[in-house]
Image (cartoon, grey):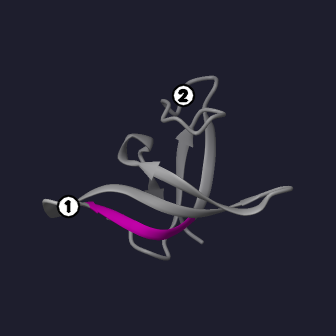
Amino acid sequence: MRAVGDRIEWCGDIDGRPIEPGDPAARTYTGIVDSVHRHPDDADRIVAYLVRCRGGVSGTYLATVLLEHRPAVVDS
């Protein structure tokens, strides 16, 4: 399970949609979990993460990472 403050990585296409890691259009993104969003009827069920990322020109931004992105914790 990922927690606030964890550094994670995930795969998405250029528009951020979930994509298979081996797909030629896949990009790997990284960021720090800012918040964990749970299902309103089941507190044990995580539905998304809000992740703080760094961009070149844009500085920092927030990305919504779904479980379909297959986020994984990475070493800092």
Identify the element where label 1 is drawn. loop
Give SS at disc 2: loop
**Along the line of sight, the residue nearer the viewer: 73 or 16:** 16
The quadrant in which residue 49 appears is bottom left
Relative to 22, is 11 above or below?
below
Residue type indicated by callout 2: Gly
Q: Which mark is residue 51?
A: none
Q: Nearer the viewer, mark 2 or mark 1?
A: 1
Q: Position of residue 27 (x, y in %)?
A: 64, 38
Residue beneath the point at 20% across and 61% down: 40
Label 1, residues with CA under 10 Å away: few <14, some 14-19, many ≥20: few
Q: In the image, which disc is placed on residue 22? A: 2
Q: Quadrant of the N terminus?
A: bottom left
- For disc 1, the marked residue is 40
Q: Residues within 10 Å of mark 2 (few under 14, many from 20)?
A: few
Q: Quadrant of residue 58?
A: bottom right
Foreground pick, 18 / 21: 18
* Residue at the far front in the pictured view: 40
- Name of the residue lying farthest toward the top: 24
Q: Position of residue 55 (x, y in %)?
A: 76, 56
The picture places residue 14, in percent across and down from the top left corner, at 66, 33
Q: Residue lying furthest left in this view? A: 41
Residue furthest out toward the bottom: 5
Stretch of the chain drawn in magenta = 32-38
Of residue 54 and residue 61, the one placed in the foreground of this image is: 61
Q: Note whether 61 is above or below 70 in the view shown.
A: below
Seen from the viewer's position, the closer of residues 39 and 24 is 39
Drawn side of residue 49 relative to residue 45, left or right: right
Q: Earlier in the sequence, mark 2 or mark 1?
A: 2
